[in-house]
Image: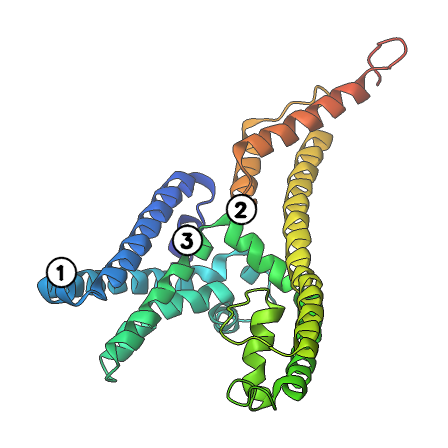
Amino acid sequence: MNNLRKRTALFFEGNGEYRKTGHYIDIFLISLIMINVIAIVLESVVSLAQQYKYEFLILELVSVSIFAIEYLLRLWSCVERAEYKSLDCGNFQRRLKYLLSPLALIDLMAILPTLLMMFITFDLRFLRVLRLLRVFKLTRYSRAMQLLLQSFRDESSSLLAAFFIMAVVLILASCGIYLIEHDIQPDKFGSIPAAMWWAMATLTTVGYGDVVPVTPLGRFFGGVITLLSMGMVAIPTGLLASSFSEQLRKRRIMFSDAVHEYLHDGELDGKLDDVQLEHLENLRCKLGLSKQEANKAIKSQLSARTKNLYCRHCGERQD
């Protein structure tokens, strides 16, 4: 049983001898998710929903069945994954920890709306929106989405600080424009909450133009808020961009360190055997690096290893 569970974990993670099979499964699930998203969008067209009612229903049932089987198998086999197997607790606690992980919650969201539909009557429009959340399952297979989520986690405190500052500026801008424009435009700036619409559109540099100040002081104040908003919006954008770049750099360094370690433990001729190459390929897939990036790291480490083997003055091999 444990051997079957371990093979199932490797199967879904696409490691070792199951890498190609796991890759094909990923392609199948990605295609199924995209088909579901397209079907949900088309189902919002009343004529199509009535004409292909049974086809949409069959696709929904088949998709939910596949997603549910995937979810249960991942839950059953997660205790064999390295990050959970190393935990000093029982299998129940390990599975509970997996259930609360972001990717597991996304998998649950993919099947929960249809399951709830069997017991609770939903507004079809609301149900359709919930089913569209399946697109987030692509996070499991998208390197860019994984990097973005990791960037959000790493910069969570900085982002919270930036949004707190933006909230304070939003309130100040709403209060200021309310005091200036309230008497002139009571229908548009009748209260501070009503003025927040203008402040939000201005601070985000959207500027819909449906609500604008008309007094000279109000226009001057609006110009100041517009200039201030350029810097405010750039703060979270800059944080995410730098963190995204840092995540890529860390993954490349991690792969380069693994290559360096294999070369250091190997023979002095600086060659990698088949087992080491297999481990590096698994690590490349896990880190989401392209083959070009991996080959570049290997060549760089091999080149550095070769230079260290020979004296730069006489060219003789060093022992």
Label 2 to label 3: alpha-carbon separation: 22 Å
Mark 1 lies on residue = 55
* Residue nearest the observer in this picture, 22 or 94: 22
Proximity of marks 3 and 1: CB atoms separated by less than 8 Å = no
Task: Residue type at mark 2: give it.
Answer: Lys
Q: Position of residue 244 (x, y in %)?
A: 63, 51
Q: Earlier in the sequence, mark 2 or mark 3?
A: 3
* Residue nearest the observer in this picture, 19 or 36: 36
Above-or-below relation of 222 to 139: below
Colouring rule applied to residues: rainbow
Q: Earlier in the sequence, mark 1 or mark 2?
A: 1
Task: Residue type at mark 1: give it.
Answer: Glu
Q: Which of the 4 quarters of the picture holds residue 224?
A: bottom right
Q: Which of the 4 quarters of the picture holds residue 299?
A: top right
Q: Which of the 4 quarters of the picture holds residue 24?
A: top left
Residue at position x 13%, y 60% in the image:
55
Residue at position x 59%, y 64% in the image:
205
Mark 2 lies on residue = 286
Q: Earlier in the sequence, mark 3 or mark 1?
A: 3
Q: Nearer the viewer, mark 2 or mark 3?
A: 2
Q: Position of residue 5 (x, y in %)?
A: 40, 57
Residue 293 visible in rendering: yes
Mark 3 lies on residue = 3
